[in-house]
Amino acid sequence: MEKALQELFEFRVQQFVGNERNARDLFSKAEIKLESLLKRSAEIVKAKAAGNIIDTTNEEEFQKVKYLAHYQYLIKQRGNLYLEEETEERVAKFYKGALIMDEEVKPPIMENDSFSIQNASEPEERISYQYDRLKAVQYAERWWNTYNPTYKKFENNCTNYISQCLRAGEAPMRGHPNRGTGWWYQHTNWSYSWAVAHSLKNYLGNSKSGLRAKQVSSPEQLNLGDVICYDFEGDGRFNHNTIVTGKDANGMPLVNANTYNSRMRYWAYEDSSAYTPNIKYRFYNIIDG
C-alpha cells in the first residue's frame, strides 16, 4: 500500500511538470492548476509531492486509506521564481493492493449561521495603533500548515488563522465580552468576527474604531498583510478568508490560508476545488488607527 502511494505521488509530480497532455487528464488537479498558471504566463519548473497516512480501514480485500498530501511547486514567471505550497486531505481505496480510487476530502467551507451575527451599531472607542505588516506576514508563514496551541483550533480554521495574523501585526482588539460586537479573542471565548468568515468580512467593511480596513476595488491595490474575502458560491455568504503574503511578477497578490492550508497561492483560487464561476471577492486594506 505504501509503495502504491509513493508511486502515485511520483506519477503526480510528472503530471505537474511533464509534457504529456494525456497524462495530465488523469489528475484534474494538475490540469486545472496548469491552465491557471498559463493565464499568468507562469509555469511549474519543479514539483514535489509527499504524504502522511492518517487512518486506514480494512474490509475483506479492500483497504481504505485517509492521508494528507503535501505539494510544493517551484513556479517561474517572467524570470522570477517563487515556491508555492499546499496540503489537502485525500482518501484512497485499494483492492488487493491495487489503487482503484483516490479523491480529495473537501474541507468545510461554511460555518454555523448562528455565529455570523455582527451588531450594526458599535461604540466608537479611539484606539491608536500602527499595523505591523511584516509581523503579520511572518506569523502567516510560521503557522500556515500547523496550529498555534495558544488559540483554539476550529474545524473551519481559515478566519481564526487570519485573525491571529492580524493580531500578530498588532491590530487592536475591542468589544469583549459581547460576542456580536468588535473583534477579539479572550481565553476560551471570542467574537463572531474573530472566527467566522462572513462576520470578519462584515466587521472589516464597517468598523470605525480599533481594527479598521478600507475596501478597494481590485487585488493589485492590496499590500502585504491585507485581507481577501471569498464567497465561493456567489450567494452573498462569504465563507473563506486569506492574507496577502507576497506578490507575483505581475504585482498580483499571493496568499496564505488555513483549512485549505496553502502558502504563496495565487489569490483568485481558480485551482481550488471550492472555486465556482459565481465566486465573488472583497479586498480590504488594513489601515492604521
Image (cartoon, rainbow, N blue to C red):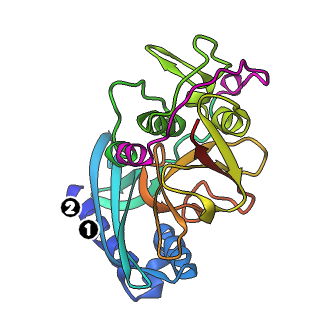
Task: Say if 117 sits above or below 228 in the image.
Answer: above
Can you tell which mark lies on residue 7? 1
Q: Position of residue 135 (x, y in %)?
A: 38, 43
Task: Say if 177 sits above or below 97 in the image.
Answer: above
Look at the image and tell me in which quarter the C terminus lies: top right
- Which residue reaches farthest left? 3
Q: Main secondary structure of the magenta part?
A: loop
Q: Given the image, on which type of amino acid does mark 1 rest?
A: Glu
Residue extent of the magenta highlight: 112-139
Q: Label 1, secondary structure: give it.
A: helix
Image point 46% across, 72% down: which residue? 30
Q: Given the image, on which type of amino acid does mark 2 rest?
A: Lys
Task: Say if 234 sits above or below 57 in the image.
Answer: below
Q: Position of residue 195 (x, y in %)?
A: 56, 29
Residues marked 2 and 1 touching at CB (< 8 Å): yes
Q: Position of residue 58 (x, y in %)?
A: 32, 41
Magenta stretch containing residue 155, yes or no?
Answer: no
Q: Is residue 95 visible?
A: yes
Q: Is residue 65 visible?
A: no
Look at the image and tell me in which quarter the N terminus lies: bottom left
Q: Which residue is mark 2?
A: 3
> In this rendering, would 95 be left or right of 175?
left
Image point 55% across, 29% down: which residue? 128
> In this rendering, would 145 be left or right of 245?
left
Nearer to the camera, 142 or 37: 142
